[in-house]
Amino acid sequence: MTSNKSTSATRSKGGILASTLITALLLGGCAVGPDYTAPDLQSPPEWRTEDASGLVQTQNATMELSEWWKVLEDPQLDSLMERAVAGNLDLKEARARVRAARARLGISEADLYPSLDASGNLSTGKKSKNAGFDGKERDLYQAGFDAGWEIDIFGGTRRAVEAAGADLEASEADLRDVYVSMLAEIASTYTDVRAYQTRLSVAQANLEEQKETFEIVESRYESGLSDALGVQQARYSLESTRAEIPTLQARLDSSINRLALLLGQQPDTLHAELTERRPIPVPPVSVAVGVPAEALRNRPDIRMAERTLAAKTAEVGVATAELYPKFRLLGSIGLESFAQSSLFETGSQIYSFGPGISWPIFHAGALRRNIDVAEAVQEQYKFRYERTVLNALTEAQSAMTDYAKEQNRRDALEQATLAAREALALAQDKYLNGLVDFSDVLEARRSLLSYEDQLAVSRGAVVDSLIRIYKSMGGGWQTMDAMRQSAEQQSPPDSN
């Protein structure tokens, strides 16, 4: 009779377990919360480039954009780019964020599977005689395995995995965005270096010419051919130009140190390499740019914003799943004995198994408030995504406009510089022949120096605007893996 009752109880438990498993299988495909759908990318059909000389819109500009810095045809810039891939600290930090996100995804995926824990225990104690026990001290030996599995019926764990997967993809897009920004910043800073060197050459050349002019004016004064006013005018013009040189040198040093930082090196490590003055890089005659839709697809920051929105949408499902019951399968098997010698005997075996359920009944609305929070955060990231798209379009259009206008400004400054140089030659000739005062020479030289300096700044600004165009198109990240492999082959392994 006892045997039948035991068998019946076992069958009853088995039925409960089977019923739980069947329910899990039937409902396992469900996942509460909203299903994510990527927003449509809204963009104009083409850029407004009617005033931009040399910009060519094309449907497939990815290949041209992937190594955009090479259009400047500067081997030293190419070398700096390659070294930065291995040494840039922002890149290393971004790679570490990717590894952390990948590990978090693994942690989330582990929650989909059963867990198994081993335990062992030795305790000494006694129980009260007044409670019906013998009051003797005894040792208790225990060893066994505990298993558990939370059946993800309502999809809370799967939504957590979905969120972690989207976060990983967002981290990978962030790495690409850091890479794109790094390439653009190196090229822009390198252009600054060459622009400051050009400006220094202009200032120093003018300084030498002003020294000669000062000597001529002083000689004429001593000969009685001019008054002291001309001498003092020549002197303050000379010293004014001399005063500009230290400022330009300081800015040049700062730009070189900035380049070293971008390469992950200490200050002053690039000064010897960049001591030789070279001209500002010259942009190509024709520049291929993608259409707006292609640019938006290429931009890593938009990809990052979209993947982050996907993660926040999945987190709404995680919060919603907390409203529903949680089903668990629990079990343990082990050994228990008062004597170590009998611990591994058949009579020491213990086990337990069965389903479990927990269901939050009353939490004063906290669970639904959590859903409200998750939905509000999702909405924030939706607006952030839309703003990122608009910012991308604005950056690209502004860079193209700046490129066009700065080219016009450069061309005008080139003509102004030619005219100022001719005016200075005429003024000097007339001064030496006593036809004009030295103030005319002074004004002509001041104008020439100003226009030559502005021209150097403008030529650098044209290149900088072109760099901003390439950055706004998301150019460069396509070569990241290949360049890193090349850098690793040429240098010791990166510990990061």
Image (tube, rainbow, N blue to C red):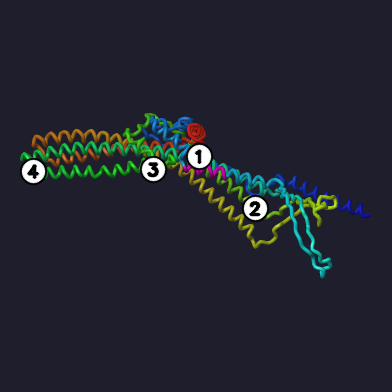
Residue lying at 35% horizontally and 43% vertically, measured from the top left: 254
Residue lying at 50% horizontally and 44% vertically, measured from the top left: 93
Q: Position of residue 268 (x, y in %)?
A: 37, 41
Locate residue 128: give its quadrant.
Answer: bottom right
Residue tagged 1: 176
The quarter in which the N terminus is drawn is bottom right
Q: CA distance from mark 3 to mark 2?
A: 53 Å
Disc on the earlier residue, 3 or 4? 4
Residue tagged 2: 320
- Residue type highlighted by circle 3: Pro
Disc on the earlier residue, 4 or 2? 4
Q: Position of residue 114 (x, y in %)?
A: 72, 47
Q: Dot 4: what SS?
A: loop
Name the foreground residue: 102 vs 154.
102
Q: Position of residue 370 (x, y in %)?
A: 61, 56
Q: Position of residue 150 (x, y in %)?
A: 71, 50
Name the foreground residue: 210 vs 44.
210
Q: Nearer the viewer, mark 3 or mark 2?
A: 3
Q: Nearer the viewer, mark 1 or mark 3?
A: 3
Q: Which mark is residue 227?
A: 4
Disc on the earlier residue, 3 or 2? 3
Please indicate whether residue 97 sits to the left or right of residue 229 in the image. right
Return the residue found at the far right. 1
Name the foreground residue: 7 vs 56.
7
- Residue type highlighted by circle 2: Thr
Give the residues in magenta.
89-100
Q: CA distance from mark 3 to mark 4?
A: 50 Å
- Residue type highlighted by circle 1: Arg
Q: Dot 2: what SS?
A: helix
Q: Dot 1: what SS?
A: helix
Residue tagged 3: 267
